[in-house]
Image (cartoon, helix red, strand yellow):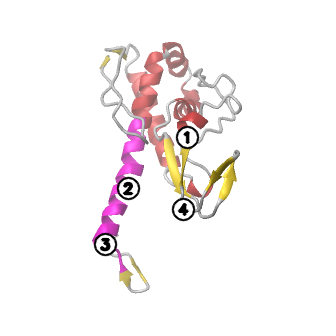
Amino acid sequence: MLDIEEDGEVLTEDELYAQCVGLLFAGHETTRNLIGNGMYTLLRYPEEMDKLREDPELIRTAVEELLRFESPVQLTSRVAKEEMEVCSVRVGQGQPVLFMLGAANRDPRQFKDPDGLNLRRLNNLHLAFGAGAHFCLGNQLARLEGQIAILALVQQFPRMRLAEQQVEWAPNFGLRGLKALPVIV
């Protein structure tokens, strides 16, 4: 990044800092939350965890369902380029628009039994990675890291259970992740 140059211009210190923060957020925090939230969810639904342990081929659909069920990224925002109307709500040019991804992933018009965990759910068109032009570039890496870590934990520790029923979520408006996940292995 230090060597990035376009038309003779290099990144400023602030731009470099912003890129590093973006990489940390996109490449670490969200994947950490995918794995932590996913394991927490499986520990709360032991019958689903047993299905995954018995049939490791489920890991791909399992991770997609865990992404939908406990999305690491809860919202994203954009600024309206022009005045528009969305669902009978007027949005002015320059106004921020919030997209509540976590809520969209529980929409009963999109998902049958949206509050139920189903590791075999097919056609799982969740929005955990956004959509369209703003679809997460690291989605395939995050999915693979989640699949490897979650399956390894489920298989390595078959008697794992929650040490406490109540967990503490990290205080963050846009991300959903645990402060800690105490377990007994």
Q: Mark 4 vs mark 1: give the one in front.
A: 4
Q: Amino acid at mark 1?
A: Leu
Q: Earlier in the sequence, mark 4 or mark 3?
A: 3
C-alpha distance separating marks 4 and 2: 26 Å
Pick whichever, 142 or 181, lies toward us: 181
- Residue at the disc numbered 4: 94
Q: Quadrant of the N terminus?
A: bottom left
C-alpha distance separating marks 4 and 1: 21 Å
State the extent of the magenta-drawn residues as a range. 10-33
- Residue at the disc numbered 1: 101
Q: Earlier in the sequence, mark 2 or mark 3?
A: 3
**Is residue 16 on the magenta stretch?**
yes
Residue plotted at (61% across, 50% down): 131
Density class for disc 3 (Cα within 10 Å; few <14, some 14-19, many ≥20) is few
- Residue at the disc numbered 3: 2
In the rendered image, which quarter is residue 173 located in? Answer: top left
Judge left or right: residue 32 versus residue 102: left
Q: Position of residue 148 (x, y in %)?
A: 45, 36
Q: Amino acid at mark 3?
A: Leu
Q: Which numbered marker is on residue 23? A: 2
In the rendered image, which quarter is residue 7 located in? Answer: bottom left
Q: Amino acid at mark 4?
A: Gly
